[in-house]
Amino acid sequence: MQETFTVYLVETRPMEALCEGRPPAPDSLWRRYSDFEVLRSYLLVTYPALVRRRVGLENFLQRVTSHPVLSDDNILYRFLTEEHGWREAAYETGFQDKADSRLRALSATFRVRNPDKRFVEMKHYSDDLQTHTTQLLRTRARVTDRLYGVYKVHGNYGRVFSEWSVLEKQMGDGLQSAGHHMDAYAASIDDILEEAEHYGDQLKEYLFYAEALRKHELSQYELEVSSQDLASKQQQREELATGSVRSFSLKGMSSKLFGQEAPEQREARLHLLEEDIAHGQEALEERRAQCRAWVDIQRFRQQKDRDIREALIGYALMQINMCKKGVQMWSNTKECFLKM
Amino acid sequence: MSVGAAAPRGLQPVTEATHPLSAAQETLSPAPDGTAICHIPSNNNGSGGGGGGDKEATALTNGTPVETSSPASASSLLNRLQLDDDQDADALDLYASTETRDLFVTVDDPKKHVSTMETYITYRVSTKTTRIEFQLPEYSLRRRYQDFDWLRMKLEDSQPTHLIPPLPEKFVMKGVVDRFSEEFVETRMKALDKFLKRVADHPVLSFNPHLNAFLTAKDLNKRQGLALLTKVGESVKQAAGGYKLRGRPAEYSAMGEYLDTFNQKLGTLDRIAQRILKEQTEYLVELREYGSVYAGWAGSEDSLRQPLEGVAGCVSTCCGAMEDLSENMSQDLLPVLREYVLYIESMKNVLKKRDQSQAEYEGRLEAAVIRKQEDKTPVPVEVEKCQDRLECFNADLKADWERWQSNKRQDFKQLLTSMADKNVNYYEKCQSAWESLVSMLQDDQAENTNETNCD
């Protein structure tokens, strides 16, 4: 079965200056809600200082096209005038990469052969977190698209009630005022969605957190590995220096079996090892500076859990607000019908 | 106009004769064949009714419209006179209805019948009446759609000057619509009930012998048909075509124009309603997916599990509420819109017939006048009969028109109010779900804060 979408008519009257050097533009074309979203993302990334927070579609276009810098943007022009192909052009600018760079998952390049259980658990957790948050953001966008459509279509009631009221004697007033309420209802979705932005932002924060978590896990792990590595090197040095073998090593065994090496060779080896250790110690210090202790990560995680709970509470409160508005608008409309 | 054999009333100018359906302050004597007795109350407030301040003629169930500008109480009476099946009635309304209405009909209790030849649905048709035209005070029998169709056809044939209410659509595409699904049967039954009530409430149609047969006869002998066509009916049917209408009185043109424009609006309303339904359905699909994402996420969390499951549950409740809303729209709103479109179609046909009746009269009159001028032949009786028929037609139509307007207002008022109400319910359900979630989330947050503080 075919999927259908609501489309919105964009009518343009380009000023003379914009037409120069560009192909003649049609007066109007149809755009989907998601087209507006793509345009907005593109503009947000390309002109981060200039694009403000979400407003209704119509206001958004008005503001953008009247802005001296934004109105000159080629992608915007194509959005307004080119039926097909503008989306590909927008993607080709690579804006999505810049937008997603913070959101892209870390590649799991683990130099470790035997990761410990704690690390594996954390890794799964942050993987899941990233997956779920990304999924949520995506489905939320689709829900928003559809919800916008539902509200806006009710605006058509406004128009037809108004036209119908002209025909009627007694029913006229009731129909007319009901129509106004339907217009208001259709318009109300713009503010609602603007409020809803906040929740989306919080979810994105959580996504960054998931990424940050993995970075920290990785560096914590690398810290542990480096310090283990350093410790073993230090031990080797001791053994070389004192000539005793405290722990089993293949080199130790082979020297026992095949005779010890010459003192110059041993000196050379010791020297290399000292350099290695020195480097290792430096690296370790660096890593330690970058790293958080395990306890810190736990605390971080709890804080984030608290933040998410807050975000959910905020989301629920926003939903309640939206429902209250809906109750009010439809109650008002009902009153008008009762007067018919 | 009386039902049954129409006794010619002679050639009085129409303006002097009082039409039983027109506003009048006197009681009429019964018509020769003992049918419709019209009682017109001497004052306007008892069982009369009018809308607000407008001059709107309304018909009482015994056939008397009263033009009045009486105050608000009249409009509540008006409510009762109309066909609000399940409206709560005030004491005043009940009083009014029991005083004037003497024929009550109901269609309910659908049952499926399976035979070797076919499967079909029958409905129980119950009648309660004090009218003498009925032998018993109560009847209950079963009828199928075909029988309603027969009744409507007979009414149209025998009462061509009246507006006959519409039936729900006859044909349903097999394979597309399930004729035996609960929703379809329910919707159809409501429409049949409405049809029958409208006929029973009509001052003239309710006395039609075919209705009587429909309500009382064990077997509707449909093929034979009842030989009770009125002379008026026959003659209007036989109105010769080929007469051209010269000038239509403005009020009938206005009716036609109104119907055309209103029809357009109905079409638009239907399209919008269907569009909303579609958008809601698509929204529902995405919303369900959205809810399941929360549920999935909850599975990989510990302390966030309960909050996330809570959100998933809430979203699910909202989905259910939206489903209910959509179902309501498709079952209540759309069928009524369609019904009125059918109504308008049949009304326009009646308007056409009226035009034909007028055209015929004028044509014959003109021919007769010319003949008279030529050879002094008197104007034939036939011409005067034509005039008679035309005037009756006009009067019937005008009265029915007012009644239709009033019914239409009530129907749409109820319909739209109910639609708004259902939307309010939807938001209330969602609101209450989110409100309980918020308390749960806030408790959960408080708990967790306490725990960490205790570390």
Image: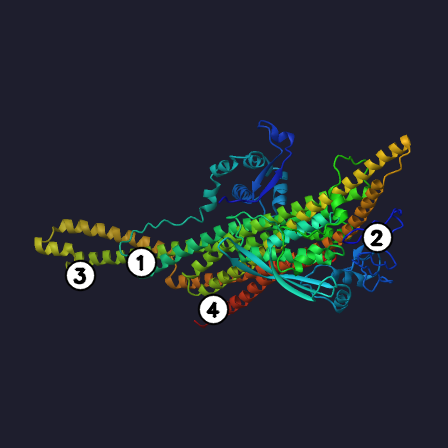
Residue drawn 78% across the image and 41% down it: B357
Task: Chain letter for mark 2, please.
Answer: B
Q: Is residue B251 left or right of residue A2?
A: right
Q: Give the CA distance from mark 1 to mark 3.
A: 21 Å
Q: Nearer the viewer, residue B450 or A237?
A: B450
Q: Nearer the viewer, residue A249 or B251?
A: B251
Which of discs 4 and 1 lies nearer the camera? The answer is 4
Label 1 in the same subunit as label 3: yes
Residue position marked by numbered label 2 in the rendering:
B19
The location of residue A179, given as percent across then percent down, is 70, 50
Residue B363 position by quadrant: top right
Tag shown at residue B448: 4
The location of residue B91, given as percent across then percent down, is 75, 69
Please tell me how crowded label 1 is: few (under 14), some (14-19), or many (20+) other residues with Cα within 10 Å: some
In the rendered image, is residue B257 in sight? no
Q: Judging from the image, what secondary structure is the residue with disc 3 in?
A: loop
Q: Earlier in the sequence, mark 1 or mark 3?
A: 1
Tag shown at residue B371: none
Q: Is residue B286 left or right of residue B208?
A: left
Q: Quadrant of the C terminus of chain A?
A: bottom right
Q: What's the image's color scheme?
A: rainbow
Q: Earlier in the sequence, mark 2 or mark 4?
A: 2
Tag shown at residue A247: 3
Residue position marked by numbered label 1 in the rendering:
A224
Q: Nearer the viewer, residue B441 or B312?
A: B312
Q: Is residue B279 left or right of residue A288?
A: right
